[in-house]
Amino acid sequence: MDTDPAVTAAPPPPAGRRRLPEPLGAGFLAEPERTLGGIRETCPVTRIRTPAGRPAWLVTRAEDVRSGFLDPRLSLSGGRVPDPDVRRRALDVTLVNYDPPDHTRIRRLATPALTPGRMAAHRERIEQTALDLLDAADAGRGQGPLELMDAFARPFAFRSLCEVFEVREEERAALYEPVALLADKTGHTARAVEESVARIDAFVRGEMARRETAPGEDVVSRVLAAWHEQGGASEDEVASLLAMLLLAGFDSTVQAIGMGVVALLHHPAVQASLRAEPERIPRAVDELLRWDTPGPFATKRVALEDVRFGDTVIPAGSGVLLSVASANHDPRCHADPATLDPERRSAGRHLSFGLGPHYCPGSALARLELAVALRALLGRWDRLEPAVPPDRLAWGGGYLHRRLAALPVLPHGRT
Ligand code: HEM
């Protein structure tokens, strides 16, 4: 053991510089509100150190989070302007790294492809996907618990994306591998990650070529149609946009399904009432998204100028974390926020899809998938119970994207 204090002791913080709190550690992933609620009520705009060791400002009250989303001085690009001469690959250009006007010219190609009306056209096939997966899961489980993430949430979200992208059956298995790897890079080498990006890039460019000659009603064809009509983006940027839609659309939805089910497992009366009146499920989806969300914070912003929230000024150059999860539980916006109320009037004001220019373009698809998934699950069994207590659930991912590794449930009485 090394006993030399000159070697083992951490250097003292420089005089006058306070050690920053680090509230987003391991316990945070399981129960974000336990940490965020205290901060919101005592010190709503505060400086912390992230688990990655970087200083950042945390903004926790609903009103401030909303105004932060709408404030152009809080930048996602950090002031960098893309160089049009650099050749780009899938994911080199993602919407969440751009600010207007670059963001606007790319983003407008995606919006018409993902409207609620367009997504509704895929409803029947997505419903059938849910029923097929539950048939298979039920047949394969015997009497034991069902691991819902692998048996249902992951394949359901992936196949739903394949439906709206109209990915050919024979390509789906090969596409799943890189999508799943990039959603959770844990335990994978940098080389494996690189290869996955290259595979997605090749897939997207192949689909673009195919849809140029045989356009359909799918997302790729719609994005290409908007691009030909409006121009304003390079081919690389369009490929990147499509890749981002595929990737951003997968794990967030997987996790939202898992977290919605966890909420219903621990609120059996709400579960029973939605099973009895499934027409209330679409509205309940927003309350479940308010209740818990995979992304407790929006993508980190950088303050381009000093920005004031109440009495606190965040200095130019600082990193800013807008806390969606805290805003969703702010009693100033949602009365009695610790009650899961599927009829809550304010539920639609949750910020789980963000707000403003970067508002989630996939929200209609996500809402559709959640409603279909919950209806199919509740309709399949008389009762779903947790197979493990909440404190035994395995949480992974990180403070920006929480991830349920597994969700064992005990289904009772097939309907
Ligand atoms: C329940 C599931 C989902 C949640 C909770 C979610 C959440 C979010 C949030 C909070 C943002 C804004 C980020 C910010 O401003 O920092 C966002 C952006 C985005 N989401 Fe989603 N999302 C979900 C599903 C989807 C789906 C299904 C798709 C695609 C089909 C998608 C594609 C995107 C894209 C491309 C962006 C970037 C938009 C931009 O920067 O303009 N998301 N999402």
Image (spheres, rainbow, N blue to C red):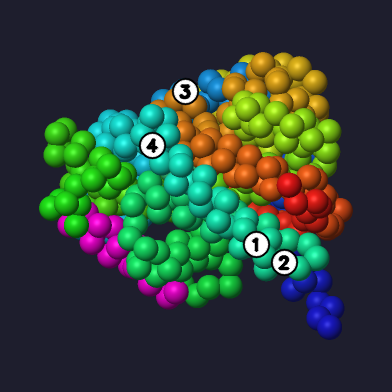
From the viewer's side, name the closer residue of 354 and 200: 200
**Residue at disc 4, secondary structure:** loop
Lower sequence index among marks 1 and 3 = 3
Which region is colored magenta? 191-209
Lower sequence index among marks 1 and 4 = 4
Left or right for 292, reference 306: right
**Label 4 crowding class (10 Å Cα cut-off): few <14, some 14-19, many 20+?**
few
Residue 121 disc label? 4
Name the kind of residue labelled 3 in the image: Leu
The label nearer to you, 3 versus 2, is 2
Q: Is residue 150 magenta?
A: no
Q: Main secondary structure of the magenta part?
A: helix
Dots 2 and 4: beta carbons under 8 Å?
no
Residue under pointer 3:
70
**Label 2 crowding class (10 Å Cα cut-off): few <14, some 14-19, many 20+?**
few
Dots 4 and 3: beta carbons under 8 Å?
no
- State the image quarter where residue 173 is shown: bottom left
Q: What residue appears at the point 58 percent right and 34 percent down from the top-left corner?
A: 352
Left or right for 232, reference 199: left
Residue under pointer 2:
141
Dots 2 and 1: beta carbons under 8 Å?
yes
From the viewer's side, name the closer residue of 139 and 70: 139
Q: Is residue 202 magenta?
A: yes
Name the kind of residue labelled 1 in the image: Ala
Name the kind of residue labelled 2 in the image: Arg
Q: Is residue 184 above or below residue 312?
A: below
Residue under pointer 1:
137
